[in-house]
Amino acid sequence: MLPRASVGNGQWLGKGWFSSWRRTWLKWRGRLLGLVLVVLVGGSMVALALWINTTPWLRIAEVKVAGQQKVEGKRVVEAAGILGSHVLTVDLDAARRRVEGLPGVKRAAVDRSWPTGVTIQVEERRPWGVWRAGNTNYVVDEEGVVLEVASTPSPGPTIIDKDGSLLAPGAWVDGEVLRLAQLLATVVPGEMGGRVLSFEYLKAGGLLVVTDKGQARFGDSKDLEFKLAVWKAVLRAAKDKGIQAGHVDLRFGYRPFLRWS
């Protein structure tokens, strides 16, 4: 027989009380087991997260640099600043931007090399010509970024900045002036049949091209084809009159200024 329990009013509880208690236990057992499971899993997840964040096995131990020739790999690694960072949470995009901030780097790509490595692919800026300010020659790329001070003669066109502003690696020269010089360096030999020797630049006067056929001040790139046509006409007329057109100012439309030599 099942034991019986008494209540305050003197009644006895038998099978009915046990059945009620059993139903209550079955009802809460699943919840209690679920709660225990949540606690166990949650604790395991916290422990796993702590382990992931603290273990040295997931720290970046090697950074490889590829594609560079003039930029030192050590400088690239230092600029990236990710050595020892967590391989899962490291900000690769921020590292890329820091590398691209180096004067000689045009573009960079930063990728994980599992399990604990990172590879940085570098595209360097290529010298286009020289920007001369005062007695200092600065090597610039095609976008106008100053790469270095030219200690030896460098290939490519030379733009002589008559205003003489001092520069530093990583600085930018006047992009519009540089683009016009690049265009004239390509167009003038074909259009004028002459050889470009150098360029001169003044903020007040713009760009002047120096060739073996004389000089022409274009100022800016506005109406470039018209200016070239006027220059041709001036040189032709000067030749017919037996004079040497040493300097032509093309900034004034149909009224070019001519100084002969």
Image (cartoon, grey):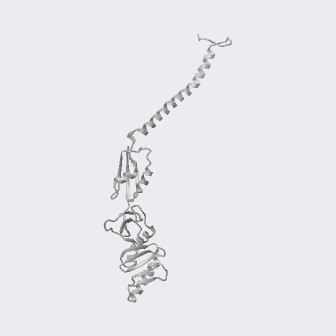
Give the residue at the far right of this rendering: 9
Return the x and y of residue 91 as percentages of the image width and height: 44, 48
Closer-to-camera residue (12/231): 231
Is 76 placed above or below 191 here? above
Q: Residue furthest left?
A: 152
Estimate the x, y position of residue 209 in percent, counting from the top left: 40, 76
Determine the image quadrant of residue 127. bottom left
**Quarter where residue 27 is shown:** top right
Left or right of 108: which side holds 24?
right
Where 259 sits versus 173, above or below? below
The correct choice, above or below, for 166 with respect to 233 in the image is: above
List x then y, in percent, for residue 150.
34, 65
Along the line of sight, which residue is nearer the eye, 167 or 47? 167
Looking at the image, the residue that sits furthest to the bottom is 241
Image quarter in which the N terminus is found: top right
Q: Is residue 111 left or right of residue 27?
A: left
Total number of numbered discs in the rendering: 0
Q: Quadrant of residue 200?
A: bottom left
Query: Which residue appears at 62% of the width and 15% of the height?
Result: 15
Q: Quadrant of the C terminus?
A: bottom left
